[in-house]
Structure formats: C-alpha cells, structure tokens
Amino acid sequence: MKTDLKLKEDILSELEWLPNIDETQIGVIVKDGIVTLEGTVDSYAKKIAAEKAVKNVYGVKAVVEDIKIVYNAGDNKSDTEIAKAAVDAIKWNSSVPNDSVKIKVEDAWVYLSGELPWEYQKRSAYNSIKTLYGVKGVVNNISIKQALTPFEVESRITKAFERSARLESKKIKVEVDGHTVKLSGTVHSVPEKDDARKAAFFAPGVTKVVNNLVVDYYPEYA
C-alpha cells in the first residue's frame, strides 16, 4: 500500500505530464489516501482535466476538488455572452439533435437539461460547453430516454459483441436493469474488456455500465 508521501509524488508526476496544466499552480494535500486539490487555473476544462488525472492515479481513495477558476482581469464573460456561446456550441455539434438541449447560465455556471436517446449525445453536449471561455462549471442534467425495452437493448449489445473480431459473445453475459447494463463473464485481454464496455455504452438508453468482466489471459497476453 502506498504511503501518502509516495501517493503525492505520483500525483505531482501525473499532473506534470498534462500538456495544458501548470502543475506549479495546483496544490496537492494527501491524507490517508484522500487527495485535496487547491490552487487556480484559467479554464473549467483544465480544472476537470486535473481532477480526472488525479482520479486515475493508483492508490487514490477520494478527491476533494477545491481548484478555483480565475480568468484574466477584465476578460470575464457575462452570462449573456456565455449563453450565446453555449447555444452556438450545441447548434454546431452534429452529435446533438437540434432543439433537444435547454441551456441556463447563472454566475458563469451552465446548466444543461432536456432529453436525449443516447448517452454519448449527453456527453458530447457537455464536452461542447466545458471548453468555452468564461465558463466556471457545467451541470449536466440531460436525461436519457429509454428508446427500447431491456430485452431489445440486451439483444443489440449481444449482436454488437458477435460482430466484433475480438469479443467472444458466448462468454459475456449481459443484464439490463433500467438504464444500467451489467457485464459479466470472461475476456482475454484488457482491451477486449474495454471494447465490451464501449459497445454497451453505445446502446440506446444506457447511462451506466457495470463492467464485471474478468480478464482470462491467453498465453500471448501474459
């Protein structure tokens, strides 16, 4: 088990690898595996990137994110300007159907609502907004409508596995509970496990994938 000191060193090294992050502007405090991030960045996208990078470090139990977004003096955007930019960003995003997402801006925070059939569309809408200059946060309240019955979703996922050259569908069990898909069984590599997760996510109405697949390595993967 990593000590807090070793974990902090690994986190600082991970932040140093991020091309758009100045790690000297971010303070890292580690206690009992819980990481607190402090400091300032000049965009919401950088704040999210730093948080995501830290969560990926082995040994991190939880992240307390207290990074502040500070824009250049005199260069803050009004809520009206941010709202217009957000509307345009969604409009020009080919992955998001027109007039399907509602936008509210308050104190530089953007709130997204509405209903979409696919999880990737919800994520795409969020990604369009998080990089806009002036945005301090994004709350993604877009809901996913269940376009198919659980049986139909399970059938589509299973057929997607069967079409894949790397996945053995007979060894993968698919369970659908509302908007959640649970995968169990075995695959032969970590990339195959990730392929299965992605295939499940692209089924309509799916918002969460619980990937319980076990990697049973072939000799060539050992």
Image (cartoon, grey):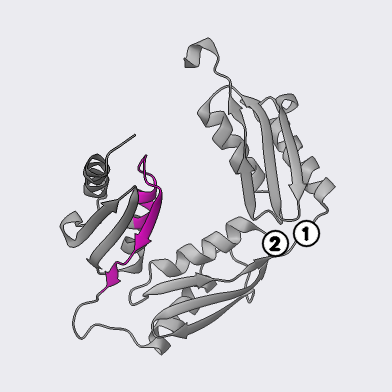
Q: Specify few, some or many for label 2: CA neighbours under 10 Å numbering under 14, 14-19, or 20 or more.
A: some
What SS does tag 1 mark?
Answer: loop
From the image, tell me which residue sits under label 1. Answer: 147
Query: Measuring 29% from the left and 67% from the top, which residue is drawn there?
Result: 67
Picture coordinates of residue 114, whole percent (x, y): 64, 74
Picture coordinates of residue 194, whole percent (x, y): 55, 36
Picture coordinates of residue 216, whole percent (x, y): 58, 20
Magenta-tinted stretch: 51-69
Q: Is residue 175 above or below residue 44?
A: above
Quarter of the image where the N terminus is located: top left
Q: What amino acid type should be assigned to the residue bearing mark 1? A: Ala
Q: What amino acid type should be assigned to the residue bearing mark 2? A: Pro
162 and 169: which is toward the camera: 169
Check if residue 64 falls in the magenta segment. yes
Marks 2/1: CA–CA distance: 6 Å
Query: Measuring 28% from the left and 72% from the top, which residue is drawn there?
Result: 69
Picture coordinates of residue 176, whole percent (x, y): 76, 47
Label of residue 117 in the image:
2
What SS does tag 2 mark?
Answer: loop
Q: Is residue 70 above or below residue 31?
A: below
The residue at the far front in this view is 32
Label of residue 71 in the image:
none
Q: Are marks 2 and 1 in contact (CB under 8 Å)?
A: yes
